[in-house]
Image: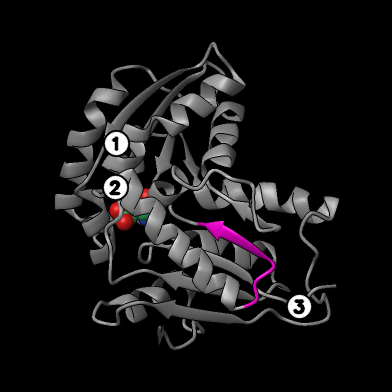
Amino acid sequence: MDARPIGVFDSGLGGLTVLRVLRDRFPHENFVYLGDTARLPYGSKSPQIIRRYSEQNLHFLTQMGVKAVIVACNSASTQMRESEIDGLPLYNVIEPGARAALAASPRKRIGLIGTRATVLSRAYEDEIRRLDPSAEVFTQACPLLVPLAEEGWDGDPVANLIVYRYLQAVMQHQIDVLIMGCTHYPLLEGSISRVTGSSVTLVDSGEAIAQMMASDFKAGRVPAGDASKTGTLKLCVTDAGSSFQEMSRRILGPDAPAVELV
Ligand code: DGL
């Protein structure tokens, strides 16, 4: 038993979609979440800057005494591919997302939407082809979707139209799976699934990483928390000027704790 928290970070509130799944799946674990809201967005920045910010986030979480870190941001994950840093297990969302996509794709025709940084890195394409060289990947950067997700505009006619415009090209390739390669995008799942229809399976970073963590808990790579206690949560942001608090309650539920500025 190990009561140390699991650290989770993202550039903003997108990673809360990952945290929501993890808390649901591992209710006895303690979590500390860092949203780097002062430096959002990451998706339009260079690989070097994204790496530097991610290392700083990792350092902050390490200081909080975490037992593992989850990079709940696809843009940051493309630059943080190590499975361990200084003996601390590190999880990025690329490999679990690629595995989940292949498992859900009988025709191996996979669409990927993400930030410019994620799409330009080709991290998903490389990982998917490493796992299955016969798979085909069709990508589209969707820079306007993060602000729409942060505004909570899922299902709004404006969001539907923008999602439609972005997805048109990938949909023409007869994909059977679409990776929501940005942790903000599950907040627009209504608008996205409206365009993809039910024949395309949506892959979500949270579900994918939770599956991988479940097997790592079993294998003892990450020691489990105290099964007799309900896990705690600490929410930290680097700038409090956004609607983070309100959105965190919308995403995690009314019991989400008060956000701390760090
Ligand atoms: N949530 C981040 C991701 O998964 C993107 C947001 C940003 O651009 O900072 O890629």
Contact? badges 2 and 1 (CB < 8 Å): yes
Residue 199 appears in the figure: no
Q: Residue 55 in the image: x percent, y percent?
A: 47, 60
Contact? badges 3 and 1 (CB < 8 Å): no
Amino acid at dot 2 = Ser
Disc 3 or 1, which lies upstream in sequence? 3
Q: Residue 185 in the image: x percent, y percent?
A: 36, 50
Relative to 17, is 97 above or below? Answer: above
Disc 2 or 3, which lies upstream in sequence? 3
- Residue nearer the viewer, 218 or 202: 218
- Residue hosting label 3: 3
The residue depicted at 33 percent of the width and 80 percent of the height is 246
Q: Is residue 113 magenta?
A: no
Q: Which mark is residue 195?
A: 1
Amino acid at dot 3 = Ala
- Residue nearer the viewer, 89 or 153: 89
- Residue hosting label 2: 191
Q: CA distance from mark 3 to mark 1?
A: 43 Å
In this view, the mark in front (3 or 1): 3
